Image (cartoon, grey):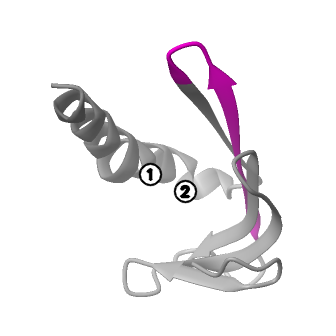
Amino acid sequence: MSKKIGGSFSAWDRYIRGKNLSLVPRRLIVQSWRTSEFSKTDLDSILVLTFEEMAGGSLLTMTHTAVPDKGAPHYKRGWRKHYWNPWAKYLKTAKK
């Protein structure tokens, strides 16, 4: 992933791709986001990650908007399976 606004990113062999729209170190990442399953007429979706300091740690909030209706359940499962569940498992073992 690029560290610059307007910089591109891709993941999973270009299945996911997009651009950084806004970056505030330690606070905010906003990206345009689409998969190879989006139709050519689908607009890019928008992924927003916010980071907040909290007592004892941090709070990460993700909002993913403008996802095509037909793919929304698939992407929701994908976020959990490929990102949130592995991340939770990592954090659980890292605390030991």
Query: Magenta stretch mostly in which secondary structure?
Result: strand
Relative to 33, residue 53 above or below: above
Is 52 colored magenta in this rendering? yes
Residue in the foreground of this view, choosing between 40 and 21? 21
Q: Position of residue 19 (x, y in %)?
A: 73, 78
* Helix, strand or loop status at disc 2: helix
Q: How many marks?
A: 2
Q: Is residue 24 magenta?
A: no
Corner quadrant of residue 23: bottom right
Boundaries of the magenta span: 43-57
Q: Position of residue 85 (x, y in %)?
A: 30, 38
The disc at residue 12 is none
In the foreground, 38 or 46? 46
Q: Are marks 1 and 2 in contact (CB under 8 Å)?
A: yes
Q: Which residue is mark 2?
A: 71
Q: Which quadrant is the C terminus positioned in?
A: top left
Q: In this picture, is 14 found above or below 24?
A: below
Badge 1 element = helix
Q: Residues within 10 Å of mark 2 (few under 14, many from 20)?
A: few
Which residue appears at 57% of the width and 28% of the height? 58
Q: Which residue is mark 1?
A: 74
Amino acid under label 2?
A: Gly
Q: Quadrant of residue 89?
A: top left
In the visual, does 82 lie left or right of 33? Answer: left
- The answer to whether one can see residue 3 in this image is yes
Q: Amino acid at mark 1?
A: His
Residue at the (68%, 77%) spot, across then down: 3
Side of 76 relative to 13 (left or right): right
For the point 75% across and 45% down, the residue is 27
Residue 43, horizontal then vertical, whole percent: 80, 71
Question: Which residue is at the front of the view, 66 or 30?
Answer: 30
